């Protein structure tokens, strides 16, 4: 928003809190209710919830281009969150897809049946979209399943630079930042840390950002014999996360469902080496070649990668330097230039008024 406005665009932001909304029970999110927006020259949708669906309809009613940034892998989340199938039914209704009752019921069947129905929904969404922005090459490659003919652009979301951490000769702190829910794969990290702790008893694991399932994780940690060696910390304000990056020696990332992960880019901007259990995220934002230290999402592989990073000071220094350089090269200004080019490709620059 700040970047676009600094470039002379007029931007209207519609999100829960700025439009009428209601909270979702047992979730830290709100759902938008019907609202009215002033016409714009382009609609940029960032979610496929009720507000996003309003964007789809508004773009069609106004006869303007629709741009969507695909932040969340809905196919990967569908069997993990009940709201995904419910939301998919709402999307199908909002798009006027005229599904039969049998087709709607397919959304309740886990696995291949639900996935096939969600793919059909994705195809319908992309058919109404002018440009699809993927925050990573991994995400863009996943669009092949939808068979889309939309214009696909890879444009990672930028992060604000974090003050660099001091380099240290010893390394004993493994940090994980994010929710403790299933899509973030905390079980893989704990299984890997069992092996790390056996080889390096002095190493500690810090889980930052644990709200839901906190008690479950505490019981799991105790059951695995890791009590006293793992710190489970609640979410903190964003500006406080930087201090945790600077206090750690390596960031462990075991999710395989993220489309980009801002945590990785933030850690790298602070000079914190990362171990990523998702080879699909090996390419840093703005780069064209793999550069991150990745491994397969298996306990032995993650443990081996963490142990190598902890034990090899030269490797940590190299990864830290490369991460800082990549983060500096992909600045918010670079992102703005590329996003503006997308808008300009739709002949929007003459009257920059974005909704």
Image (tube, rainbow, N blue to C red):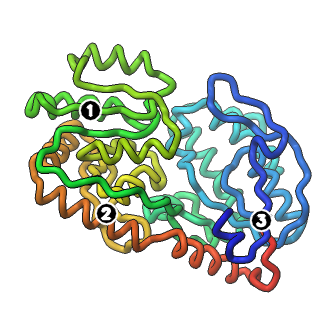
Residue 339 occupies quadrant: bottom right
Badge 1 vs badge 2, beta-carbon distance below 8 Å: no
Q: Is residue 106 visible?
A: no
Q: Residue at x 15, y 29 (%)?
A: 197
Of the residues under marks 1 and 3, which one precedes in the sequence?
3
175 relative position to 77: left or right: left
Give the spatial CA distance, label 3 vs label 2: 32 Å
SS at mark 3? strand
The one of 212 and 47 positioned closer to us in this rendering: 212
Q: Is residue 176 visible?
A: yes
162 relative position to 171: left or right: right
**Position of residue 172 measured from the top left corner of the image (x, y, whole percent):** 17, 38
Which quadrant is home to the N terminus? Answer: bottom right
Q: Label 2: few (<14), some or many (≥20) within 10 Å?
A: many
SS at mark 2? helix
Badge 1 vs badge 3, beta-carbon distance below 8 Å: no
Give the spatial CA distance, label 1 vs label 3: 42 Å
Residue 167 occupies quadrant: bottom left
Q: Measured along the vertical axis of the image, is residue 339 above or below residue 278?
A: below
Which dot marks residue 205? Answer: 1
197 relative position to 296: left or right: left
Q: Residue at x 41, y 17 (%)?
A: 216
Q: Measured along the vertical axis of the image, is residue 1 above or below residue 116?
A: below
Reading the image, the residue beneath label 2 is: 323
Which quadrant is home to the C terminus? Answer: bottom right
Which dot marks residue 302? Answer: none
SS at mark 1? strand
Reading the image, the residue beneath label 3 is: 11
Q: Label 3: few (<14), some or many (≥20) within 10 Å?
A: some
Give the spatial CA distance, label 1 vs label 2: 22 Å
């Amino acid at each position: 928003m700040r970047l676009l406005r600094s470039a002379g665009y007029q931007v209207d932001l519609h999100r829960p809190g700025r439009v009428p909304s209601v909270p979702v029970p047992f979730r830290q999110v709100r759902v938008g209710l019907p609202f009215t927006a002033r016409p714009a020259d382009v609609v940029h949708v960032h979610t496929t919830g009720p507000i996003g669906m309003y964007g789809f309809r508004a773009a069609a009613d106004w006869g303007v281009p629709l741009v969507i940034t695909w932040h969340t892998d809905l196919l990967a989340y569908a069997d993990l969150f009940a709201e995904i199938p419910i939301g998919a039914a709402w999307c199908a209704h909002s798009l006027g897809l005229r599904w039969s009752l049998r087709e709607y019921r397919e959304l309740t069947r886990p696995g291949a049946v639900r996935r096939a129905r969600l793919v059909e929904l994705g195809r319908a969404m992309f058919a109404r979209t002018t440009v699809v922005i993927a925050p990573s090459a991994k995400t863009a490659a996943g669009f092949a399943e939808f068979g889309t003919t939309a214009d696909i652009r890879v444009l990672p979301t930028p992060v604000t630079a974090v003050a660099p951490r001091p380099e240290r000769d010893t390394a004993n702190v493994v940090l994980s930042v994010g929710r403790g829910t299933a899509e973030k794969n905390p079980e893989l990290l704990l299984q890997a840390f069992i092996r790390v702790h056996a080889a390096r008893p002095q190493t500690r694991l810090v889980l930052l950002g644990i709200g839901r399932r906190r008690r479950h994780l505490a019981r799991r940690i105790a059951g695995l014999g890791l009590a006293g060696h793992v710190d489970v910390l609640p979410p903190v304000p964003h500006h406080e996360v930087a201090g945790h990056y600077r206090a750690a020696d390596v960031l462990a990332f075991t999710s395989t469902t993220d489309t980009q992960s801002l945590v990785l880019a933030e850690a790298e901007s602070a000079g914190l080496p990362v171990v990523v259990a998702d080879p699909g995220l090996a390419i840093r934002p703005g780069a064209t070649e793999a550069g991150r230290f990745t491994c397969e999402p298996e306990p032995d592989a993650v443990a081996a990668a963490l142990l190598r990073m902890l034990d090899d000071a030269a490797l940590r220094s190299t990864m830290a330097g490369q991460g800082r350089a990549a983060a500096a090269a992909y600045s918010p200004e670079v992102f703005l230039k590329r996003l503006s080019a997308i808008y300009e490709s739709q002949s929007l620059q003459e009257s920059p008024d974005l909704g």
